[in-house]
Image (spheres, rainbow, N blue to C red):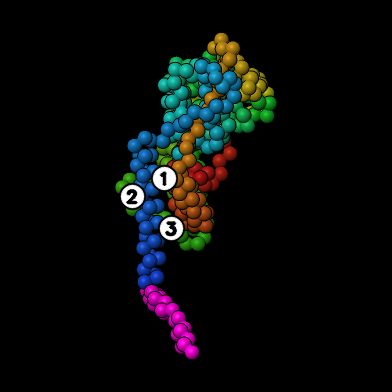
Amino acid sequence: MPEAPPYYVPPPPPPAPPRSRKWLVRLLVFLLLLSLLANFAQSVAFQEYASGEKPYEKFHSGELIATDKIARLEISGVIMPPSTDRWLKAIKKISEDDAVKGVVLIIDSPGGLVADSHQIYHRLQKLAEKKPIVVSMKRLAASGGYYVAMGAGPKAKLFVEPTTWVGSIGVIVPRYDVSDFAKQWGIKSEPLVTGPLKNTLDPLNPMKPEEEAVWKAIIDDAFARFVNVIDTGRARLDDAAIRKLATGQIYTAQQGLENGLVDVIGYDDDATEDLKTQLGLKSARIVEYQFPTGLFDVLSASSESAASSSAAIDPLKRLFEANVPRAMYLFGWRPGMAQE
């Protein structure tokens, strides 16, 4: 009887790689992914640097295939960076586009920084020399919001919705006075300065008469410019009438109409139709302008949110920021608004 063949014994499996090698592989994969992400971020940054942030046109309403265009430019929210730069770029694009025959300027703003309001006003003045502008005011067109509307020029028609608030003509430089509180707690502010007026608006010290005189001159200058801007932009109002209205008061749509601050109670559709009539256009493509949201917009938004949260719980940071002077054409100011 033949012998039974021996049982097959498979060779033993190869020994498992040492644990240290597994971690090395994982580390290399992680570094590879990190490198790819870094290269992508650098590519995006280079493209943004090379091309610059530019607004892109988007269809809003009207005839999609119409050759002639009407641009909608919306100034909304507080007038301050970074929005200011984007609005200026949109104005530039509108100005350079020959197909755009006119502009509907949408205002929904409580105002903002003096310098930013004037920059936008100045660019709108230049635009109005080339193309007619009609203004449509929505919820709020106050202070700097009303200021920029004057850039449309004296021939522009100003529409307001029935519930719009307008006016608040004036200037504000926020200031805190916590000198009594500081005195109670034995806190003194004694900065080293090169001149007696270097540390004006210090919230830990009462304002001195000479400091009040300096800031009064600054505010009066900004206020006179505001009055002159309205005087130039509103043919129905003269200097005396404007100064009578310029108490900082907010006006309803009807009050604004009665006082010559606006021309018509209506909506942005009415403003658009009025502009089409002025231009003699039976059909037009209504367009608006937006900016792309890139990787760095998301990252910067996250960092700004974190910074805002940090500032909200840092009273010392708020105290130092309170000492930074900011002249504003602004209605409804509250602490911290200029930093938001």
Could you tell me if residue 118 is visible in this image?
no
Residue 140, compared with residue 6, is above or below; it is above
- Tell me if label 3 and label 2 are in contact, CB under 8 Å: no
- How busy is the neighbourhood of tag 2: few (under 14 within 10 Å), some, or many (20 plus)? few
As for residue 131 lying within the magenta part, the answer is no
What residue is rendered at 48% in x and 40% in y?
293
Helix or strand or loop: what does disc 1 sit on?
Answer: loop
Task: For marks 3 and 1, give the CA distance.
Answer: 15 Å
Specify the amino acid type for callout 2: Val
Taking the image as shown, residue 21 lies to the left or right of residue 125, namely left
Mark 3 highlights which residue?
A: 188
Residue in the image at 52% along x and 54% along y: 309
Position of residue 253 in the picture relative to residue 290 (left or right): right
Q: Position of residue 284 (x, y in %)?
A: 56, 17
First-in-chain label (3 vs 2): 3
The percent position of residue 282, horizontal first and vertical second, equals 59, 12
Q: Would you name the residue on which mark 2 appears? A: 193
Q: Which label belongs to residue 200?
A: 1
Residue at 46% x, 88% y is: 3
Q: Within 10 angstroms of label 3, few (less than 14), some, or many (20 or more) residues? A: few
Dot 1, crowdedness within 10 Å: few (<14), some or many (≥20)? Answer: some
As drawn, the residue found furthest toward the front would be 1
Residue stretch in magenta: 1-20
Going by the numbered disc 3, the residue's amino acid type is Lys
Q: x, y (%) of residue 2?
A: 46, 87
Label 3 element class: loop
